[in-house]
Image (spheres, grey):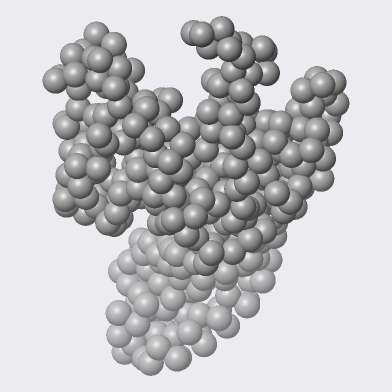
Amino acid sequence: MKIKDLISLSINNLKRRKLRTFLTVLGVIIGTASIVVMVSLGIGQSELQTEMIESFGSLTTISVYDQSMYDMSASDKDKTYMNDDMLEQFQNIPHVTGVSPILSFNAICRQGAYEGRINIQGVSNEYLKDIELGQGDLSDIDDKKLKFIYGNQVKREFRNPKTGEDYWSTGKEPDVDFNKPMFVVFDTDKYYQSVNGGTDENGNKIKMPKKYIIDTLGVVKGGPEDYNQYCYGVYCNIDALKTQLKSIYRNKPIPGQPTTKKGKALPYFVYNEAKVYVDSMENVMDVQKAITDMGYMANSNAEWVEQNRKSMQVQQAVLGGIGAVSLLVAAIGIANTMMMSIYERTKEIGVMKVLGCDMGNIRDMFLVESGFIGLMGGTIGVALSFIISKIINFMYIKNQMSAEGAMMNMEAVGNISRIPLWLVAFTLFFAIVVGMAAGFFPSQRAMKLSPLAAIRNE
């Protein structure tokens, strides 16, 4: 018997008992939808956690910190400062694609009646290109002329020194325009001494240090309430910053930089932090271990993702198991339907055997029927799960927006239920396999029926 004939015969047999077929298919629909929705919730939670972690930085980036700068008990010989030579060693670690030092420096920005103490971070062009700008153009990066990229929440750091008003006391951002000239004071100690009427060792009043006009390269994308890893920082090309600091302090010690025992400046810059870029997330932990073995503290978002993945795998298994119970009940319903069908069609089976029908065809007929029940229930169940998923996501996003107490973009919140294509394909295949497995033993019984006994059966 051809497969086309088997399918046609199976569909006709299912149509004979429409109500029974509908109830059996309904059980598969409920079981399939339960599995898809439960697993989709686990997938959604896992991906939401990963996206949240990724928002704090790339999953293939390692942050390296130099603790020796702050270790006052260690001698200069024992300290392994993170300088350009050490960064070159990082670069030679297998799977490392790039290294960006971070040179932090505190300065004061002034514009109109406002001033703000900011933290400048000199970084590589590779680092700068990862920053998404709302204003400006990264093609204007210059490693010789200093230009700033301001975080979208840096305005909150400005205050009016005369009135004491700032964002935290008024709830309004100061009237600072990054597109206008910004005066920057790098020698903050001398600035505060001059403002407070300080005097030098000769009793002379300390003069206000020189102010430099620094152009704006861009502003980080985002509104005043949008948080991201760049929102509070001020970024620039590290070579341009080093040139500026050398010009200001000449041979004098630069604030924040370690010195010799005699208080003299070191002949090189020391970085308190660096970013190490790895070719793939699978190699991050190996590179991170190599860096920690060199005596530095290192961490990465990949650590949190791995921990999150393990916990979510357990959660997905539990949720999938709960849904699978419903499909197991549906499988029992399919087996019951097939057994009842055999009892009702005993005489028909006997006639088929007497006419010489192959035993395998009789078995296949019942297997195709049960598989078709699984296919119908699985298809409708998957469609139903998409509807349920949309309802769950709508309620979740609405609740999140209400909890935040602010107008947010619905897409920015993220869906808690996510149904990937592989889950759809696997569920349909699983439903068909479960259906055929449930019909296997009834089909075996149909094969073993005695032809004469089956024909005499009323």
Q: Please, which residue is most extreme toward the left here?
A: 77
Query: In the picture shown, does residue 202 fall above or below 112?
Result: above
Query: In the picture shown, does residue 379 fall above or below 159?
Result: below
In this rendering, does residue 382 appear at all? Answer: yes
In x, y percent, where is residue 5? 45, 91
In x, y percent, where is residue 192? 62, 19
Seen at 58% across and 75% down, the residue is 14
Which of these two is toward me, 96 or 352?
96
Which of these two is toward me, 229 or 274?
274
Residue 440 appears in which quarter of the rendering?
bottom left
So how many labels did they put on this image?
0
Which of these two is toward me, 26 or 45?
45
Residue 437 appears in which quarter of the rendering?
bottom left
In x, y percent, where is residue 65? 33, 31
In x, y percent, where is residue 405? 81, 35
Query: In the picture shown, does residue 286 fall above or below 15?
Result: above
Query: In the picture shown, does residue 180 fall above or below 247?
Result: below
Horizontal placement of 22 versus 283: left or right?
right
Horizontal placement of 341 versus 365: left or right?
right
Placement of the N terminus among the 4 image quadrants: bottom left
In this rendering, does residue 393 appear at all? Answer: no
Seen at 30% across and 49% down, the residue is 99
Seen at 63% across and 71% down, the residue is 17
Which of these two is toward me, 14 or 246?
246
Horizontal placement of 162 versus 292: left or right?
right
Seen at 51% across and 70% down, the residue is 375
Residue 19 appears in which quarter of the rendering?
bottom right
